Image (tube, helix red, strand yellow):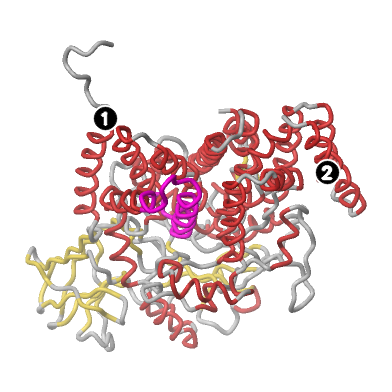
């Protein structure tokens, strides 16, 4: 489709030009996660445990890693970093295509549908969150879910079975893609869409919730493991209000919907609002003008959709209004979600759809074309006066296209301007900058059949560099050992960055912060990154330096595996030999002078099972977060094996449910003897 092709063309640089994104979660989460998935699948195994973050994490248990989301397996077919970018761009194109189809279902023509898809796929919000990896995958399915719901609501009685099956499949794709905030937004949009479009609202709501219920067994291979993981995470009882609402959309950012990169002072210290979830929420004056025209025409469904968008925009304001606190009390899933600003994604979807409808209507009505041309030409002047030249030129070009009645010219101007604004929001760097071993970490020796060396980087470090852009500053951080940057190269980062880390691990690490080097010793952290001047008078030995930061070796750490007389882990520790250090399979050879415990300084978690000399043995906690098994005196072989709780049972339920769904979605056979 045209919109999908335009969006894909806007990302030709990462697609074929050898460049990539280099901001925020792209470096600390997306690329390490995709690289780990790529390496496991390429080796012929499904990754269930990641031993490169903290003391180890359940990889398949967190749906954001994409183990249960088959499109994410695309990264196994090509080099991991390029595959990660390809996966994101494919989903951006999917988002554009779905929005285009949805706009056409409510009255947009072909050009209007293309405008809607371009506005969604190239919006400032989409350009911002692509560097965070996961939201784009889920956001891509939102318009397709609405398309499926719309088909179901308007289907003839004989076609409802198949339409319901497709709606359930769309819900399942939304769940499997892994972003709970997008799932909540999709649910809110689906609810609003049903209330606006259903001929009979009560019946429509029954179908809506029925298809959602039918989607749950389809997505069970993701739901069951994630529910197990949720129970041990810090989100189990809901996030505190203050933590969850840190990135609420400031009311002054509403101006940024029309004004690109508008400098907005921070209310507390006069600085610009740089610490935001989305680097930009820009849609542009032409898109907003076309959406406004669709609403101003007085069509009931356009006005109703505008009300839904307004309600979602209020939720995006988060802590800046009392409404969000009330909503969070009522809507239980919202308590698991950080950053209300994420609700802007739903607003962008609705505005893009309305803009597509308004675009089609405006070019078909002479008075509307002239009126909108005058409005956009008038707005171009203040943009030019305040040096927003791109917005001024785009507005003037669209105004000219309206006068000349050239929708293709207007579409091209909007697409070009949004593309350029996207490049500004997420500047690109050569892909080799994110695929080489971080130079400061290159001095750490690794071996394929030994446990990953653990490394700790003091928080808040800023390397000295000549970086002129945010992307270059991010690369300088990565080069000096940014969290998780060494995971693809055989290193483990402690505590590491992972949204689903066990709450107990957070508590132990935070409580031990005042122990200094002793905390690192407890968990076999051999390497540490500190400012150059901080190594003196410490037990550490400097091994490499870059950008004013030093990689130092900690020689006093505990061994990774050992025998202790008791779970107090005091007294003499007798090291064990780790013979199989695979992520899901760790074998130890231990010699116990007396009866005691074989301790492995890897994370205790549901799903691990142990045997001692071939006999099953219960695993107990050592030092609150590590694994241990009781052993008698003598020589022993201990085997730890991991299977993600709920993954296999969930996969079986999902497989059977998908088979049933395909049977229901299959067209009914023609009656015997019926005429063609």
Determine the image quadrant of residue 591: bottom left
Q: Is residue 468 left or right of residue 355?
A: right
Is 195 colored magenta in this rendering?
yes
Picture residue at 68% right of the left edge, 68% below the top: 250
In the rendered image, the quadrant that contains the N terminus is top right
Please, is residue 277 above or below residue 18 in the view? below
Task: Check disc 2: other Cα within 10 Å, few if <14, some if 14-19, many if 20+.
Answer: many
Q: Is residue 268 left or right of residue 233?
A: right
Relative depth, front residue between 368 and 264: 368
* Disc 1 secondary structure class: loop
Relative depth, front residue between 286 and 270: 286
Instruction: Return the mark for residue 376.
Output: 2
Task: Kindly identify which residue carries mark 1.
Answer: 666
Residues at circles 2 and 1 in contact by the CB criterion of under 8 Å: no
* Disc 2 secondary structure class: helix
Please, is residue 295 above or below residue 568 in the view? above
Q: Is residue 632 left or right of residue 30?
A: left
In the rendered image, the quadrant that contains the C terminus is top left
Please, is residue 529 above or below residue 159 in the view? below
Relative depth, front residue between 514 and 395: 395
Residue 602 shows in this picture: yes
Q: Position of residue 440 (x, y in %)?
A: 57, 60
What's the magenta region? 176-205
Q: Residue furthest left?
A: 615
């Amino acid at each position: 489709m045209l919109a999908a092709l335009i969006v894909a063309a806007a990302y030709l640089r990462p697609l074929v030009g050898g460049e990539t994104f280099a901001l925020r979660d792209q470096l600390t989460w997306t690329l390490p996660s995709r690289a780990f998935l790529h390496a496991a699948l390429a080796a012929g195994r499904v990754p269930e445990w990641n031993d490169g973050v903290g003391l180890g994490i359940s990889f398949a248990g967190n749906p954001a890693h994409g183990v249960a989301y088959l499109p994410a397996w695309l990264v196994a077919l090509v080099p991991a970093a390029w595959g990660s970018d390809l996966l994101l761009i494919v989903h951006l194109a999917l988002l554009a295509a779905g929005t285009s189809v949805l706009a056409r279902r409510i009255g947009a023509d072909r050009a209007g549908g293309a405008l809607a898809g371009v506005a969604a796929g190239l919006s400032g919000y989409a350009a911002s969150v692509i560097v965070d990896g996961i939201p784009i995958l889920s956001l891509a399915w939102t318009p397709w879910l609405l398309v499926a719901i719309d088909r179901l609501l308007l289907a003839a009685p004989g076609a409802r079975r198949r339409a319901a099956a497709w709606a359930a499949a769309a819900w399942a794709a939304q769940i499997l893609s892994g972003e709970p905030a997008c799932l909540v937004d999709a649910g809110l949009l689906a609810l609003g869409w049903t209330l606006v479009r259903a001929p009979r609202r009560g019946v429509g709501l029954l179908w809506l919730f029925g298809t959602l219920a039918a989607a749950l067994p389809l997505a069970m291979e993701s739901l069951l493991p994630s529910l197990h993981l949720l129970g041990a995470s810090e989100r189990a009882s809901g996030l505190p209000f203050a933590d969850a609402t840190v990135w609420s959309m400031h009311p002054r950012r509403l101006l940024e919907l029309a004004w690109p990169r508008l400098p907005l002072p921070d209310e507390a210290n006069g600085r610009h609002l740089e610490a935001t979830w989305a680097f930009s929420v820009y849609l542009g004056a032409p898109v907003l003008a076309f959406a406004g025209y669709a609403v101003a025409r007085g069509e009931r469904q356009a006005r109703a959709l505008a009300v839904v968008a307004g309600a979602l925009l209020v939720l995006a304001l988060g802590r800046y209004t009392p409404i969000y606190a009330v909503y969070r009390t009522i809507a239980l899933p919202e308590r698991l979600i950080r950053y209300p600003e994420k609700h802007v994604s739903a607003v962008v979807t609705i505005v893009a759809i309305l803009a597509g409808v308004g675009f089609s209507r405006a070019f078909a009505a002479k008075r509307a074309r002239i009126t909108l041309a005058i409005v956009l030409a008038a707005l171009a002047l203040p943009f030019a006066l305040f040096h927003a030249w791109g917005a001024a030129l785009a507005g003037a070009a669209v105004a000219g296209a309206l006068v000349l009645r050239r929708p293709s010219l207007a579409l091209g101007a909007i697409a070009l301007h949004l593309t350029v604004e996207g490049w500004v929001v997420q500047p690109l760097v050569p892909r080799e900058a994110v695929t080489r071993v971080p130079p400061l970490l290159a001095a750490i020796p690794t071996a394929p059949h030994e446990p990953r060396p653990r490394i700790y980087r003091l928080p808040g470090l800023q390397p000295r560099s000549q970086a002129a852009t945010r992307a270059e500053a991010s690369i300088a951080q990565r080069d000096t050992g940014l969290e998780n940057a060494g995971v693809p190269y055989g290193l483990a980062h402690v505590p590491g960055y992972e949204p689903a880390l066990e709450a107990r691990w957070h508590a132990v690490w935070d409580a031990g912060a005042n122990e200094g080097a002793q905390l690192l010793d407890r968990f076999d952290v051999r390497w540490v990154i500190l400012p150059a001047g901080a190594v003196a008078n410490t037990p550490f030995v400097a091994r490499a330096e870059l950008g004013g930061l030093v990689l130092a070796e900690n020689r006093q750490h505990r061994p990774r595996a050992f025998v202790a007389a008791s779970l107090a882990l005091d007294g003499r520790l007798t090291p064990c030999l780790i013979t199989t250090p695979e992520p899901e399979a760790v074998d130890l050879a231990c010699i116990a002078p007396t009866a005691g415990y074989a301790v492995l300084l890897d994370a205790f978690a549901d799903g691990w099972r142990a045997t001692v000399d071939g006999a099953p043995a219960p695993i107990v906690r050592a030092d609150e977060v590590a694994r241990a098994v009781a052993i008698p005196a003598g020589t022993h072989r201990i085997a730890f094996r991991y299977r993600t709780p709920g993954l296999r049972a969930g996969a079986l339920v999902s497989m059977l449910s998908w088979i049933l769904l395909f049977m229901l979605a299959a067209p009914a056979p023609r009656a015997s003897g019926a005429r063609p």
